[in-house]
Image (cartoon, helix red, strand yellow):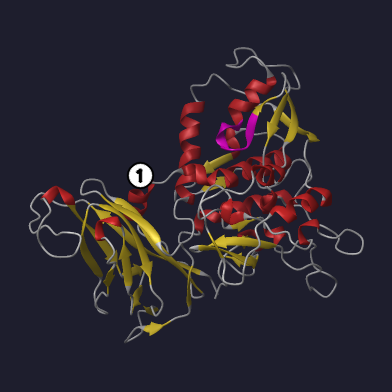
Amino acid sequence: MLRQLLGVTVMGLALAACSSTPIDPSGSEQGNTESDVGSINLPLTTQVKDVAYRLRLASFLISGEPLGAKPRLVKPLDDADKHVEKLPVGSYSILLQKGWVLEKRGPEDKAYVPINAQLVTPNPLSVDVDGKVTSVAFFGFVTTSGDVTLGDGEVEIRIGVQDCSAYDTYTAQLGALTVDCIGTLDPKAYSVSKDGYLTPSFDKCTTGQEGKLRSIKQLLSLQYRTARLPFAKHCMADRYNAFLQDFSTSGVDVCPTWGSQRVINPITPAVLEKIAPSLPVIPDDGLKDDGRPLPAFIMEALKVNSTYAVGFPQGIPTQQGCTTPAECALKCAGAFPGFALDTVGEASVLTDPVAWLLDTTYAGPPMEPDPYLRPGYYHPMSWYGGIPGVQFGEYERFEPCGLDATGAPVCPPEKCTYYTGVHKLTTLQKDCIIPDDLDTCNSYCGPPLP
């Protein structure tokens, strides 16, 4: 069965000019001017083709400085399509309390029926209400009964408030895989489909590394995980389109070839031996976040800086809008934000992927044990790039040593941390859009999937 992604959107709506009764932080209808008031819309249903979904028995605890020491408990009616709550302008935390039930009704069903679901987005979440500009956040669920995406209108609203730098780890790895697969970063190597998804224009790896093509497809499948990565389609496909428009005026007509040159700081057992004692100890109930980042040396050690030799077989073409192969390569690599850091001389480029997105595999003990499985080590994904961190890794991190002759995993999945109000320790899970199609699979760090 397909794994379903359902987003329940929470919007901070602008207050219309005709709005009337203002409220104060205590909830009484006095004391504030009209400009001090906004509202939050809590949609409770969604329709996907001919199947309807609704969230029942939902209780939202809204807290924030404008409400003082008295958080507001909101219990929408079970048969409501949405709930609108007026609030003073300010920043809020919204907690979906335990006890909710997700239900669906198909075209032949007479009534809604409960389905297994897992909340996979941060809870509580943050939303701002300013009475002027719409801000958006949402609760997302994973179920086992199909794939559900939200309408384009709501996605377009979310695009306006998303910082795409959070997706640079994924686009950086896409750049690395592309170089390994076809030996260049030609912007024409990808296109955006009529449905708005980034897709490869090639169907095989010219370098002989066919496994890289599967990893590319797996990484691009993140665009379809709309509950946990609501901006992936925008931050991967739309950014690629925007790059192509800028690139068309760059004066670069031909991109150089790339070849692996040197790994500057490979992740070795000795590196992980040094890192592990400095990682925070995670209690069974999770580690409360104190706002401090991990020691800088940990994150730096988990970035595998590499240099690539770049060049043109026949020399730099005339009339190019760049003067060295490295400068040309850097401009072409702009299609993959986060990948190419800088030039190294005239014919080399420095790159920067992270550990949990590497597709390295191991033979398994006793020949070649997975170094990431050493005691005390875990991928600190919840600390990477700010709360809530990153949730997805390369599929091989779930199955790092492959399968034996009987089809059983040789090594267990690697450990990682995810954030849900506190940092929690778990093992990476196999997460496939289509279970029997490895091209749609990644490793996922989060609460247990249904």
Placement of 174 over or under 382, stated as above or below: above
- Amino acid carrying label 1: it is Gly
Q: Residue 450 location, x and y as percent?
A: 54, 76
Q: Residue at the location (17% across, 50% down)?
A: 36
Residue 387 at least partly seen: yes
Between 294 and 440, the residue placed more toward the observer is: 294
Q: Quadrant of residue 284?
A: bottom right
Q: Residue 260 location, x and y as percent?
A: 78, 35
Placement of 447 over or under 159, stated as above or below: below
Between 312 and 103, the residue placed more toward the observer is: 103
Placement of 56 over or under 211, stated as above or below: below
Q: Residue 56 location, x and y as percent?
A: 33, 78
Q: Residue at the location (26% across, 60% down)?
A: 68
Q: Residue at the location (53% across, 46% down)?
A: 167
The residue under label 1 is 160
Looking at this view, name the residue that lies furthest to the front: 69
Q: Relative to 138, is 321 on the left or the right? A: right
Looking at the rendered image, the quarter that the N terminus falls into is bottom right
Label tally: 1
Q: Which residues are magenta?
A: 333-341
**Residue 390 drawn in magenta:** no
